[in-house]
Amino acid sequence: MNDRPCPTARPRHSIAAGASPRLEPVLLTVTAAALIAGGIAWLMGAGNLADLFWGLGTLFALVPAVGWVVVALRHGRTGVDGIAVLALGGTLAVHEYLAGALIALMLATGRALEAAAQRRASHDLRSLLAHAPRSARRRTHGQVTTVPLSEVAAGDLLVVGPGEVVPVDGRVENTPAVLDESVLTGEPLQVERAGGETVRSGAVNAGGAFELRATATEQDSTYAGIVRLAQQAGAESAPVVRLADRYAAWFLPLSLAVAGLSWLISGSAVRAVAVLVVATPCPLLLAAPVAIVSGLSRASRLGVVIRDGGALENLGRARTLLLDKTGTLTRGRPRVLDVVAAPDVKPTEVLRLAASLDQYSPHVLAQAIVDAALARKLELSIPSDVAEEPGRGTTGNADGHQLAVGRIGADVDRPAWARAVDKRALLDGAAVAWLTLDGHLAGAILLRDPLRPDAPRTLRHLRGAGFARLLMLTGDRTAPAREVATVLGLDDVRAELSPADKVAAVRAECEHAVTVMVGDGVNDAPALAAADIGVAIMSARGSTASSEAADIILTTDRVDRLADAVAIAQRARHIAVQSALGGMLMSLAAMAAAAAGLLPPAAGALLQEGIDVAVILNALRALRVGQAARPALAPTAEALIHRFAAEHEKLQDVLESVRDTADRLSDPPGPEDLKAVEETHRLLIERLLPHEYAEEHELYPALAPTLGGPEATATMSRAHTEIERLSRRIATHLQLAHESGGLPAEQLDDLRSCLYGLNTVLRLHFTQEEENYFSLAP
């Protein structure tokens, strides 16, 4: 069970602070100056003046310390500051001013370090509010007027222009609307809403202007609810209890008992004060903040910004991980999955023509098609007469042909290969962009938001770090969400969730364990604020709102930084606990000596300083690199990873050629089928096999030291062998076909099996290399 209650109804700030942020540096400066000035006066023989300086320094620290104790008691807590107050007051009472000045300096140092560890950014959700519309365009009596959003009522007819945010919930009146709903669902794909369909506020109009019939007021609409949820979730998150305060729960009464017994037995108040002086929990006041600050510093070097020490400490105890899908586990941007061509067209030509036309389209799928073509070094043509119909696609002319890229109607007659594309898109959860050439279907491009290459390895490391439950929370459809969850081995998936549903799921998990929520969109902000630890990924589509609602921000678009952050948090927390306990054991020994009269207050304060130095040096070990989730790479290996990752992109057309050739083999085969096999074999010999050979003899040896030896790449090497074996088998088929003057029917089954098998092995092999090796490079 979680040893801290799930957030209920307390403000999200540190009640331990209890003072102005400017007090800590002033307190540190004054106490240090008082101790130094008293030391100078004592060396000059002015004992009374030295006592005056030391006494003033002690008094200056005593006043705010009493305030901190009062604030803690009002919140039902007793912390480490209570012992410090008793020690400071005791030294003044028995005139041990030097001891009081030393304690004052230790207290001020601890508070300053803790303040540095607990800086937190504002949670005012400025970007959420900035995105929210302030007005709407209302159509009345044939005229369109701009009115404040608060004046919009249910039933009003509104006009939403291109690029505008839908102001309130409503229904599309007539013209279909093309919307970007990523703010609400996290999904990067645009959707089309036909007349009569509902539209939620907060979505962005990605097409032409349309009319909206309002069904709710501003306050009752979806986006206003998201803002309220984020505000409520942030207000209900409980403050983090300081590590030091948890140990003080038993250390404080023990110290008072020892001091009281020593006074009772010896009759000396000085001896009791000496016990309190050495009992002053400076190992708690200093060691834990130093270790936490060191952990924060170490994390920041890796691009992980942790808001405060409490978030780092909590991350080290977390046992449940909740993840958004789009932009967190996936890239958040569609990519070309495959290119399918009609029997008389090459896949590369389908991609080239589609990209040529889509150069002028702002659609997210069009950009993905253009990026894929450019990555494969295809020469794009300049189109003319380009026109785009929102929700349908782009039309134009290029290379003397009339082209269209986008959707096709359900009534369009589909040949067998096109029907196979529809089925595959359904099975793969992919979107389809059809290419029409001079009025005839010429090919199709399948697009899908792919997994992040580093996601599988990251989740394996997080399981190894102690996370018992890994769950996905997403607004996406159930089928693609479950496919991602299956590939990653998640414990559960909850799909088609609204922002309110996500918050409810997060709160339910908080009841059972310290819970981390990871996301990157505005729609994730309420869930991030509701979690014990919210983690925002500042990707290319990352949201400022989600970062402001989060406790931890990954400034680079890599989810594996989360595994690094967990490793750092666990190491820093372990060192903090180790330093605090070690320091307290030494303090207990000093308390026994002081109770026996062997340590006067001033000598006890100096001994306590020695204990502080020891625990601080130990706490600084948190700055050193511990066991990282991502192994360090040599510069040569990193350069090779980038080289071969780029080659993977360029080889996608080879994989498509292998599959396309297998698809087109028919019974009986024709001359064109043999030419297709010959072309595929040429691509294998000239491009693919040299790439695999170079990986085996350059990349794998360079990675071996990082991965622990050559055995780590043995399985991948076996895949290279299988790729070469299947390629040789295809070559043998070609040789037999040439001897026979064509492809005999009896060869077809085995040849088709070789091609499909090679396609499967290649895709699996590429995916494994990208997940296990290429994701290691920053």
Image (cartoon, rainbow, N blue to C red):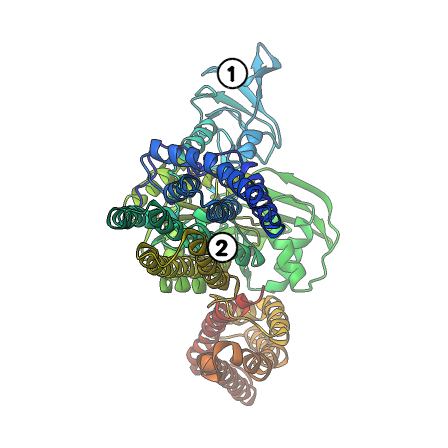
Residue count near mark 2 (Cα–Cα under 10 Å), binned few <14, some 14–19, many ≥20: many
Residue 232: image quadrant is top left
- Give the amino acid type for the residue marked by disc 2 in the picture: Val
Q: Secondary structure at mark 1?
A: helix
**What is the x, y in percent for residue 289?**
47, 51
Of residues 443 and 713, the one drawn nearer to the viewer in this rendering: 713
Question: Can you give x and y, in whole percent of width and height, for residue 674 in the image?
Answer: 56, 77
Picture quarter with the C terminus: bottom right
The secondary element bearing badge 2 is classed as helix
| Residue 602, image x, y percentages | 45, 52
User: Decide: marks 1, 2 in contact (CB < 8 A)?
Assistant: no
**Residue that lies at the very extreme toward the front in this rendered image:** 45
Which of 597/3 is in front?
Answer: 597
Against 704, residue 154 (above or below) is above
In the displayed structure, would residue 365 be above or below residue 598? Answer: above
* Sequence-earlier tag: 1 or 2: 1
* Labelled disc at residue 662: none
Q: Residue 655: name its quadrant.
A: bottom right
Q: Marks 1 and 2, Cα distance to the nearest angstrom?
A: 51 Å
Q: Residue furthest top?
A: 141
Say which amino acid is labelled 1: Ser
Instruction: Out of 621 and 461, give the one closest to the viewer.
Output: 621
User: Is residue 487 visible in the rendered structure shown here?
Assistant: yes
Q: Mark 1 — residue?
A: 150
How far across and how far down the image is residue 420, in percent? 45, 58
Q: Is residue 120 above or below residue 468?
A: above
Residue placed at 48% from the left, 48% from the top?
Answer: 110
The residue mark sitting in front, 1 or 2, is 2
Residue 191 appearing in the image: no
User: Circle 2 is placed at which residue position?
Assistant: 290
Residue 526 vs 314, above or below: the answer is: above
Mark 1 Cα shell of 10 Å, populated few (<14), some (14-19), many (≥20): few
